[in-house]
Amino acid sequence: MNVENFVKILNSDFYTGVPDSLLKPLCNYLMHKYGIDSKHHIIAANEGNCTALAAGYYMATRKIPVVYMQNSGEGNIINPVASLLNDEVYAIPMIFIIGWRGEPGIHDEPQHVYQGKVTRTLLNDMDIANSVITPETTENELKDIMSDYSTILSHGKSIAFVIEKGALTSNIEITYKNNFIMKREEIIEHIVSISQEDPIISTTGKASRELFEIRCANQQSHKYDFLTVGSMGHASSIALGVALNKTSQKIWCIDGDGAALMHMGSMAVIGANRPKNLIHILINNNAHETVGGLPTVANSADMVSIAKACGYPYAVSVDSFENLDNELKAAKNRNELCFIEVKAAIGARSNLGRPTTTALENKENFMDYLNSLS
């Protein structure tokens, strides 16, 4: 179904969400039509954030908003759906558009498989009427569904459309870029070179994929790394848990701007605990690159000042490899919590692969290595 017709049938003029690769036609359409416009389209930090924002829009306008996300974000909406939107509380209706990663019967990465199985179960449990949009769904079928759902919405209840791969189409292509020079994969190569055999916890998306391939190219063991292939926004908290229990070992966290923004409260917890052995590196390209390159709000946030305000005793931003190497070497030898923001370009190799070890193998090898350390 052409995304312009899909949007026309939904008949909403406000969208907020977290980008998803399966929803790329919708995301590109919204960026092409509205850009980032507070009256019509906002890319938020996480899916719960989107839901609350949409609730405010509804109360101010009495118009139905749309919230879009990957199904991995369903967990983030459970609380506002149950305690804010539900018709036994405030009865605030909205339309959810959810990309169906890990759809049963369709091969996908391990972090999506279980989420795919429970996608519609969670919606049913939250009392959200839902329908699947397939590549074969016609506009007339969608109009009939929306007609049926209009009564549900009028009673203050929400609905959802679960979008299969290829269900939405568009001729709109947008190239996302910034003015930074350093490529993320090269940044990670520098981190690996200086961290040596120190454990690394890397965030979800292309950063972990690149770290895995760098180890392969260097003929190094993967035991040094924990690849947080799912659970976006939580790599730094995992790293904190490791650092607090391996106090004589330097621990590195490779984070991303979209991930850090998604659960920024973790920085406050890290700053409050101040583990002297943790180096938190934020590779900031101002983009949700792994799912298409749409912008984050990191370009309007001073991440170094945020880190300092959260209690990090040392925080710095770099935009050259010379400064990066100097800061990495200093952090390795510094006996205090460090935050290094690295300004990065958008882009990755077209032939970038995925980890060839299973998630369980990654965890077991990493745990064995941690337990071998003092």
Image (spheres, grey):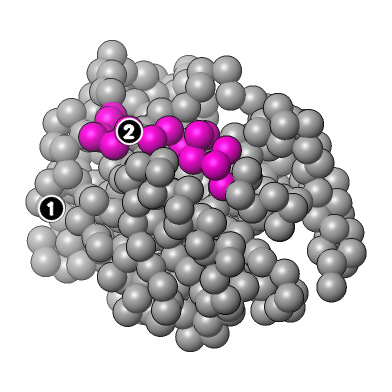
Residue neighbourhood size for the residue with mark 2, other residues' Cα within 10 Å, grouped as few (<14), some (14–19), many (≥20): some
Task: Give the magenta-colored segment's residue range.
Answer: 176-191
Q: Give the residue drawn at x 24%, y 28%.
A: 29
**Residue 88 rendering spot, x and y as whole percentages:** 40, 77
Give the farthest residue toward the top. Answer: 171
Q: Nearer the viewer, mark 1 or mark 2?
A: 2
The answer to whether 270 appears left or right of 84 in the picture is right
What kind of element bears circle 2? Answer: loop
Q: Give the residue drawn at x 13%, y 37%.
A: 34
Are circles 1 and 2 on residues that touch, CB within 8 Å? Answer: no
Residue carrying label 1? 38
Q: Number of marks in the image?
A: 2
Q: Is residue 349 magenta?
A: no
Give the farthest residue toward the bottom. Answer: 272
- Residue 147 found in image quarter: top left
Q: Is residue 173 visible?
A: yes
Q: Is residue 196 above or below residue 52?
A: above
> CA separation, marks 1 and 2?
30 Å
**Residue 249 rendering spot, x and y as whole percentages:** 72, 69
Q: Is residue 5 visible?
A: no
Q: Quadrant of the C terminus?
A: bottom right
Residue carrying label 2? 181
Say what amino acid the circle numbered 2 marks.
Answer: Ile
Q: Is residue 181 magenta?
A: yes
